[in-house]
Image (cartoon, helix red, strand yellow):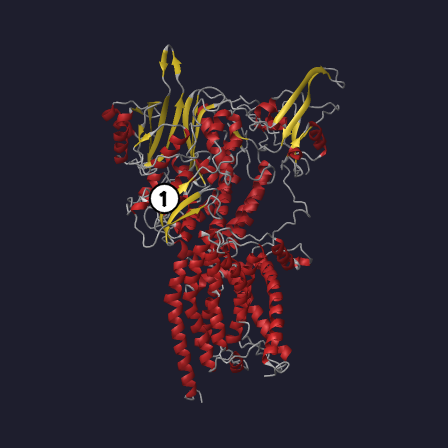
Amino acid sequence: MSTHAPAHPVETSSAPAARVPTPVIGPRANPYLDIESYEAEGDLMVLNMGPQHPSTHGVLRLKLWLDGEVVVKAVPYLGYLHRGVEKLLEKLSYVQSTPIVDKNDYVASMTNELALVMAFEKLEGCEVPRRARYLRTICAEMQRVASHLLWLGTFALDMGGALGGGTTAFMYCLRERERILDLFEELTGARFHYHMMQIGGVRHDLPAGWDAHMKQVAADILARIPEYESMLSENPIFRARTRGVGRIDALLAQELGLSGPNLRACGIDHDLRKSQPYAAYDEIEVRSAIAYEGDVYARYVVRVAEMRESLRIATALIDGVPSGPIMGRKPIETVNAVKPPAGEAYVAIDSPRGELGSWVVSDGSPKPYRCKLRPPSYHALAALPYLLPGTTIPDVVVILGSLDPIMGEADR
Amino acid sequence: MNMLFGSPVLHALILGVVIISALLGVTSYFIWVERKFAGRMQSRIGPEHVGWKGLLQPIADAFKLLIKEDITPKSADRAMFNLAPLLAVTVALLSLAVLPLASGLVIADLDVGVLFFLAAGALTVVPTWMAGWGSNNKYALIGGMRAIAQSVAYGVPLVLAALVPVILSGSMNLSHIVAAQAGGHWFAFWPIGPGFAAGILFVLATLAEGNRIPFDIPEAESELVSGISTEYTGMKFGMFYLGEYVHSLVGAALFVTLFLGGYDGPGPDVLVLQLAWFLLKTAVVSMLLLWVRWTYVRLRSDQLMTLCWKYLLPSGLVLVVASALWVWWKQQGGLA
Amino acid sequence: MSLWKPMFDAARTTIRNLGRKPITAMHPFEPRVRAPRYRQSFALLHEANGDEACIGCKKCEKICPSEVITVGTAAKRESPATGKKRGWADDFTLDLQACIVCELCVQVCPVDAIVMVRVPNAPGFEREDLFLTMKRLYENEALPHAPAIGSSMIASHNPAPAAAEAPKEPAA
Amino acid sequence: MIGPDAVLLARDRFGLESSDLGPTLPRERLLEFARALYGAGYVYLVYISAMHHPAAKQGETEVPARYTVVYRVRDLARGLEFPFRCEVPLGTGVPSLAGVWAGADWQEREAFDLVGPVFENHPDLRRIMLPEDWEGHPLHRDYAINTPHHPWR
């Protein structure tokens, strides 16, 4: 397994973590079902859920064939938010591409920048100083908490409706997320798209008093998480809506390339922060939460445990931030400052949604020859045609919410 | 029974106009209370800028709805589409007719009052289905179908829950039921067994009839865009909204009449005091309903049906039998 | 009664929050307290001796990812204050409508001419309201600046072991 | 960490040397190699992508325009990873691996849509990002390079 000792799973699970459960190959829904050949009791209704729909988490169109209220076949249509980012990255130089990638996963832009910038650094072979690596890890972990908070809010909203318990949980989560955004505003001057990372290190140094403020925010959020759980985790209505719904078997999850909380909820202890430690993750013991059912409730439990884990990591690292330079190469002062030698590199990090990688091919010019981004949301959406047949419409919304897709990232 | 102006028709007419206009005024300010209460619960403040502390907000909302464009989809079933909102409000107001606000202060003192408001309760599904079918929209159709399934299912526990006070008080006339609870013998607490459980059953069933959280599947915003009222704009949408709130207020009032002793309360039997007691109890029950509304998430439609057929219905039957046994045992001079 | 306890827990949470102070800030009426590094709009600066700082070198125009800056370079001439020959910019436009606020232009400016200000540009109804001409950029100079200027950022980025101290924050 | 067993597999059965970018498979044996990898435990599909190379002059030989289709798979149980690729001239197609990994379906649809290589006997090869009737593949090196950047003003 990975160089680290088998990670102690935060989530209590009887099976030893290292053992990957034998893939369960249950009857898999056939995503290419020929509709004409399917004989339904009544006649089928084709319902277009999206692209403009209150709970498709962005602009996703789900074409559902319904037999009564049960989904027979689901075909997602993407591309409504396709902005040609990969073409744009071929037109812009290495220096200019970081702020562009910020906008892909607009809920966790720190990790977007980190994935791209680490690929460029691997190409150029420059070494990032320790202080910058610490700052990167802290920002990535706080961004994970902010992203999971927004996910928890919209997930409760999908289930509870705009005028009800769902909105209450949504308001609580956004109240906490606002404090993390203030933290990032204090650090980088921006609230959503930070442009914090740069080839060779970090662009903004810690302002005075930031670490005390951060520890205070982390402690407050840690104290508030039991409140959300009291509203959701044990609530019989919430459990009735989530247990056993949208179950993904381990083999399908791996074949589809699911990653992050979606994969760890299927019982596979795959976490890039442990198997390929980057930034400052090798200097801290990362524990990843594992659940074994692979259903919506398991993904919920894994994400809430991950929130606690990220707060612990960020608080542990902030005290030991070493002094020293925050950039490993000479400062970037012109558009063609970075000219990596010809070559190819694939670097992947563990973003809040899963494995976010970037495969960059350079030909020695200041512009990348080809730059493919590997978004975890695209793979999560690929699971929909397998998960949705057999469920009802309310479940479609809950399963989609539990996969936590971001269309900006999936469509690029 | 002191008939105003001698003839029951005139009495009902005048009292009806007074009560209905009072209720519509109370409902609009009940919406203000709910938005403030829900706001505070979600650590925000609710309407604040329109008038002092947002007090003019309901009037502003009503005015806004009036001047909004009134769209009828081209391929909609015009008659059904336009009639549904009117029916939604009138049906919600119907069960007000038999509600005794104070001794003698009731629009129509029917001997079959309970039967009347149960029938009115069952009627609430008609406008919902008309809106669902009439707006020729897939989401509205699904919402409408769900509304029928829910109302048919929850009609039965509603009847059973309403039957318990009838058995305990021995009459279907709401004034007699309130009289039977006089002196603090409220059915919700006095025969602690059947009364209290029937009260909870009655509240759940009224929530389901009025499509309120956690039973608001016909108008489920997150999955059905907004269910039956997807195609409605302007005042038609406002009517649905108003119907829902009137139904929840009248439901709370009915719960108070059947289980919490209506206008019965300590102090002399002065009309004003009785009315005050009645309004106070209804307010408390409505706030409890609001609290439930802003805390829980929504059930799935099939879980809702299993909850009703497998749990609420049997418990309703058990309660009716228990209260009948209790009444028989009391008649045998049980505690003599 | 394990069914009812979580239902009461959820209700207890919402009621507990009823007691807490709401966090709503009356934004338009009470201005929101912003961090010292908050950066929204742009300004062009004058040098100490009163000359316009911008020398029209087009570095910012080249590095802008969304190509919103256009600089018109004027002929080199002596500067009235120092007497030395230097470049001038006679036209500088920045279109806020497509600007992605990435602060690269501030970072690459060799003479710290362009800087970000802490006051967001007033929303307008026409496209021209978002189109900062040279005149408006110089008017923005009066607004409070964000602390990061080109030289301070480059200083903090230099990898030399004696790293420059963190950019000094003005007492915001 | 590059899987040593996959490297051995590539060298013994397919006679291909694999650099850190992985072996370059001929298109005929790609499916066979993929099934062998799947059997060896590489069930996690990381991504499938493609790259377009315009016709170029290497010395005096004229290298025709071609696609490079890049694959990367992992075996999570043993923590191993294995990239491999396949080069195809512009006209010919690449055998689809949707039969081996379920995730390959969407990955290949995106590679076909944006870059252009055709994947043979793919269950449902349609464009996924761009509208169905879009002509041309945006990530070609010569696709709309110098379209005038309409002035914002």
Residue A8 at least partly seen: no
Q: Quadrant of residue D33?
A: top left
Work out whether A243 lies above or below A121.
below
Q: Which residue is most to the top?
A: D60
Question: Tag 1's secondary structure?
Answer: helix
The 10 Å Cα crowd at callout 1, few under 14, some 14 to 19, many 20 or more, is some
Q: Amino acid at mark 1?
A: Pro
For this view, does D81 lie left or right of residue C30? left
Q: Residue at x 41, y 64 (%)?
A: C2
* Quarter that holds the C terminus of chain B: bottom left
Q: Residue furthest left?
A: D13
Q: Is residue D36 above or below residue B243?
A: above
Q: Find disc 1 in the rendering and name its residue.
A: A385
Pinpoint residue B20: horizontal percent, then vertical percent.
Answer: 60, 69
Give the answer, above or below, for where B68 lies relative to D131: below
Q: Is residue B134 visible?
A: yes
Which of the chains bears the disc numbered 1? Answer: A
- The N terminus of chain B appears in which quarter of the rendering? bottom right
Q: Position of residue C142 (x, y in %)?
A: 72, 33
- Horizontal side of A32 relative to A216 (left or right) equals left
* Viewer-side residue, D99 vs C1: D99
